[in-house]
Amino acid sequence: MSIVFVGIDLAKNVFALHGVNELGKPVLIQPKVARARLMDVVAQLPACTLAMEACSGAHHWARQFAALGHTVRLIAPKFVTPYRMSGKRGKNDAADAAAICEAVQRPAMRFVPVKSADQQARLTLHRTRQGFIEQRTATINRIRGLLSEFGLVLPLKADTVRRQAAACLEDLPSWANLSIGDLLSEVHRLDERISQYDRHLAQMAREDARARALMRLSGVGETTATALSATVGNGHEFRCGRQFAAWLGLVPGQYSSGGKARLGRITKAGDSYLRSLLIMGARAVLAAAGEKTDRLSRWARSVAERRGYWKAVVAIAAKNARMAWAVLARGDAFKLPA
């Protein structure tokens, strides 16, 4: 019998392959395949379903294997773990490949869509920009921590830290003056880099028709629109907007038992970067609602009055996620509410 499913455990240099036939019996077990030989080994396989964990390099390999005529499936690592641990102890590359091969055969298994090279290239801008923001936050916190040793306790607001730290430089001892001055220069450099990447994202949004359509939504700007377009694509992997919102973790978790429904906090599953962008956009929508009379603003104010600020923010973010899916999946067929 021919090989039907193959699980591949990805790594930097040594890969593991586990293939089964139609009856589920192992017919291909290669626990050590060098990186240079992987393409040759896969090219010799008959057309089958190849499964991998959605980890570093997975999308690149998926595109390479798909070009050879194979059907490629990417699985989130948390969905593979139960199949590796069931009835067995220990973890190794061969066991991981066998667990991936077992998981891909499950009829209800959920898969990660394979991203194109262009989608990944667009996401590199977001990852780099986010890294600069994290470095800037860490540097500002370092300034606050060092100044507190000299009795200067500054608030959390970044602009205030920049202004007050620069104003008190002359009052610091010589070496502290040098250190704080260098840190302020680093913050200024990071500000320039972040502004430069903001311009790159704005240019990307202007050139992307999907991003331009997403920016028609309230609370969705250039950063959120380009991130959604690059991450989700056309959104056809989701059956509806509610499923997309659930994938982002914007829905309450269920703890139901005995016929009694219990809903807790939001699950916070899925892409945390997209979720944070939608949450920040929702805060802007709620802040701008004011005395506006449009349908969205009136609804946002009513939710905030009934359920509180943060629940209203999450509700707005979930609504935006559902409408964003409709924009991506339906295109021109979707019309925004008046």
Image: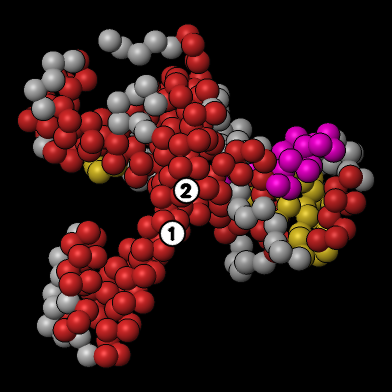
Q: Residue at x 62, y 55 (%)?
A: 56
With respect to residue 299, does 221 lie above or below? Answer: below
Q: Is residue 181 magenta?
A: no
- Residue at label 2? 197
Quarter of the image holding residue 44?
A: top right
Nearer to the camera, 98 or 317: 317
First to last magenta residue range: 60-76
Query: Visible in this render: residue 31?
Result: no
Query: Visible in this render: residue 55?
Result: yes
Task: Classify residue 142 as left or right of residue 121.
Answer: left
- Residue at label 1? 132
Q: Quadrant of the N terminus?
A: top right
Q: Of callouts 1 and 2, which one flags the residue occurring earlier in the amino acid sequence? A: 1
Q: Could you say where residue 312 lies in the image, as x and y percent from the top left?
A: 18, 33
Query: Regarding mark 1 in the picture, which secondary structure is present there?
Result: helix
Q: How is the image coloured?
A: secondary structure
